[in-house]
Image: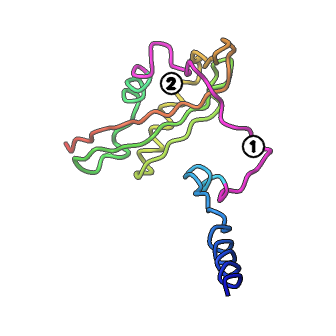
Amino acid sequence: MKKFIILCSICIFEIVFSQKNKVEKTAREKHDSSQPQDLSVPPPPISDFPAQYPGGNRLFLANVRKNLKESDFISSDKILKTKIILKIDPKGNVLNISTYGSHSAFNDEVKKSAEKITKNTPWEPSKNKQGITVVDIVNLPFEFKTINK
């Protein structure tokens, strides 16, 4: 009888303590595993010194504001918002301009204004830690308060 009790306790001990512990994945691991990976797409550029407009990005936004044709999107007293995204090459040339916001006419007008400003004006290119100029993507939020006349 003692042998049977010892054998049963060893079996129970074996079953209880032989289960593997589940290792919880971090949020990043869960996200990476759920996303399809396209190896032909390079990772986003890493730059320690981001690209900027000559005189600063605030000057760029002020120039965009000056070149807007307000009559195209004035509807009422409200604040219109968009995000201007520029892709700058290693020589400082603007490769692409995109705008994202809820008001399409405002987005189009901001994009036209930004294209007009950057047409003949090279940006100061982005640099990495080694001082080599690299491609950079610049995100600039833009707000405009419409005034009903």
**Compared to 29, does 58 lie above or below?**
above
Would you place residue 38 above or below residue 62 in this image?
Answer: below
The answer to which of 128 and 142 lies nearer the viewer is 128
Tell me if residue 19 comes above or below residue 147 in the rendering. Answer: below
Identify whether 23 is placed above or below 15. Answer: above
Query: Can you give x and y, in whole percent of width and height, for residue 128 in the image?
Result: 64, 18
Q: Nearer the viewer, mark 2 or mark 1?
A: 1
Q: In the image, 7: left or right of 83? A: right
Res. 41 mark: 1
Label 2 vs 1, first from the N-terminus: 1
Residue 104 in magenta stretch: no
Q: Regarding mark 2 in the picture, which secondary structure is present there?
A: helix
Residue under label 2: 117
Q: In this view, which residue lies farthest toward the left?
A: 149
SS of the residue under disc 1: loop
Residue 96 percent location from the top left of the image: 62, 35
Quadrant containing the C terminus is top left
Q: Which residues are magenta?
A: 33-59
- The amino acid type of the residue labelled 2 equals Ile
At label 1, the amino acid type is: Val
